[in-house]
Amino acid sequence: MRVRPGRCRWRSLSKRRHRLFSYPTVEDQLVMQESDRQKLQQAAPEIIKYFISLVQIPPEYRLFLVDQKEQKTPVSVTAVENAASKTVIAEVYTESYNSSLTGAKCWRGKSVERVDPDKIRLTLHLDWDENEFIFFEAQHPDLSRFPWTDTTAE
């Protein structure tokens, strides 16, 4: 990726022009080159394979397709592999939290690092305009990591 040429110009939200309250102008935005697109598209299959290898580490993660309404539908690894052929960019990230009960049915989570994360998310971009996505989420099989889903306490 390359930065558009030109001086770095800052617009200020305050009269003092303090950088904390400033933002870069449009001229300073990144421009994606064709070589960047090629590298991202070539990397996508390896990123997807990496995600699949992570979710298959024993004990296997529960794998879901996440729709626009954030509804989760259980899927198999095959669904991820089938979506891979249409992908131009793939992104993987993880989330883990230590959750504590702060009130009646109210939980607070603090982000933590874990070797085996609570959730592993895969975002597949299907076009360069970032209009079409497919989201997959893998959840750790230990449900005690998601205490708010425990219905036995009620």
Image: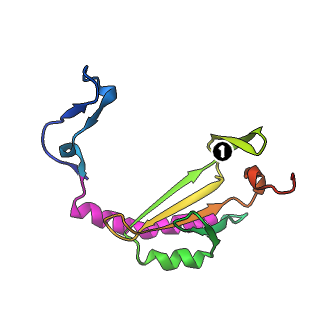
Magenta-drawn segment: 31-55
Q: What's the residue at 35%, 68% (across, down)? A: 41
How many marks overall? Answer: 1
The magenta stretch spans residue 115 = no
- Horizontal side of residue 5 vs 67, given as left or right: left
Which quadrant of the view contains residue 73?
bottom right
Residue 125 visible somewhere in the drawing: yes
Residue 58, relative to residue 110: is it above or below?
Answer: below
Residue 89, relative to residue 6: is it above or below?
Answer: below
What is the chief secondary structure element of the magenta stretch?
helix
Q: Which amino acid, mark 1? A: Tyr
- Horizontal side of residue 39 vs 154, given as left or right: left
x then y, percent, for residue 21:
32, 28
- Please give the residue where the numbered disc 1 appears in the rendered image: 97
Extreme residue toward the top, this view? 16
Residue 56 visible somewhere in the drawing: no
x then y, percent, for residue 17:
25, 23
Which quadrant of the view contains residue 63?
bottom right
Residue 117, relative to residue 9: is it above or below?
Answer: below
- Horizontal side of residue 143 vs 65, given as left or right: right
**84 or 17, nearer to the observer:** 17
x then y, percent, for residue 151:
82, 57
Q: What's the residue at 58%, 66% (across, down)? A: 53
- Horizontal side of residue 151 vs 59, given as left or right: right
Task: Using a 10 Å C-alpha cutoff, classify the residue at mark 1 as few (fewer than 14 neighbours), some (14 to 19) or many (20 or more).
Answer: some
**78 or 24, nearer to the observer:** 24
x then y, percent, for residue 45:
44, 70
Q: Secondary structure at mark 1?
A: strand
Q: What's the residue at 64%, 52% (across, down)? A: 117
Which quadrant of the view contains residue 91?
bottom left
